[in-house]
Amino acid sequence: AYFFRPSLLLGPREENRPGERIGAVAGKLISPLLVGSLRKYRPIHVDAVAAAMLFAATHDLPPGAIESDVIAQLAARESQGLEDSGAR
């Protein structure tokens, strides 16, 4: 089993959440400063989380928690696989 642990999620919402919107803006501003072990606290887009879930479902990964920084890496690998296959 996989446990995805994304940081602040970015993307469209039906609800009006002003605090979350402020957090998203602040997160985008400080994101370049979050390096090393702090990288897992960078905001991540919902599409990246979905791509990482798809990658995990179609590849043999060790079970356990998947932090936000690894989610971003898996999403990039999934996107690369889609580009290589010509799918869009």
Image (cartoon, rainbow, N blue to C red):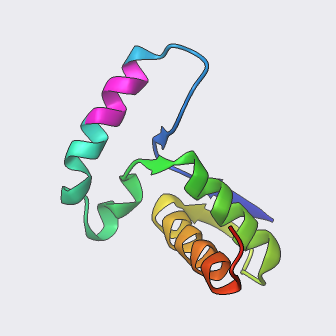
Residue 20 against residue 3 in the figure, above or below? above
Q: Residue at x 21, y 58 (%)?
A: 32
Residue 23: within the magenta? yes
Give the percent coordinates (x, y) of residue 31: 26, 52
Q: Quadrant of residue 38?
A: bottom left
**31 within the magenta span:** no
| Foreground pick, 65 / 27 | 27
Q: Position of residue 44 (x, y in %)?
A: 46, 51
Looking at the rendered image, the quarter that the N terminus falls into is bottom right
Tell me which residue sits at (54%, 31%) in the image: 12
* Residue at x 78%, y 84% (from the top left corner): 60
14 or 23, nearer to the observer: 14
Residue drawn at x 40%, y 47% is: 43
Q: Where residue 20 sits in the image (x, y, percent)?
A: 42, 25
Nearest the camera: 27 or 3? 27
Q: Is residue 16 above or below residue 51?
A: above
In which quadrant of the rendered view does residue 50 lie? bottom right
Please count the marks in the image.
Answer: 0
Horizontal side of residue 10 vs 19, given as left or right: right
- Tell me which segment is drawn in magenta: 19-25
- Left/right placement of residue 29 relative to residue 87 reads left
- Helix, strand or loop for the magenta stretch, by majority: helix
**Quadrant of the snapshot with the C terminus:** bottom right
Residue 39 horizontal/vertical position (percent): 34, 62
Question: Up-down: is 68 above or below 88?
Answer: above
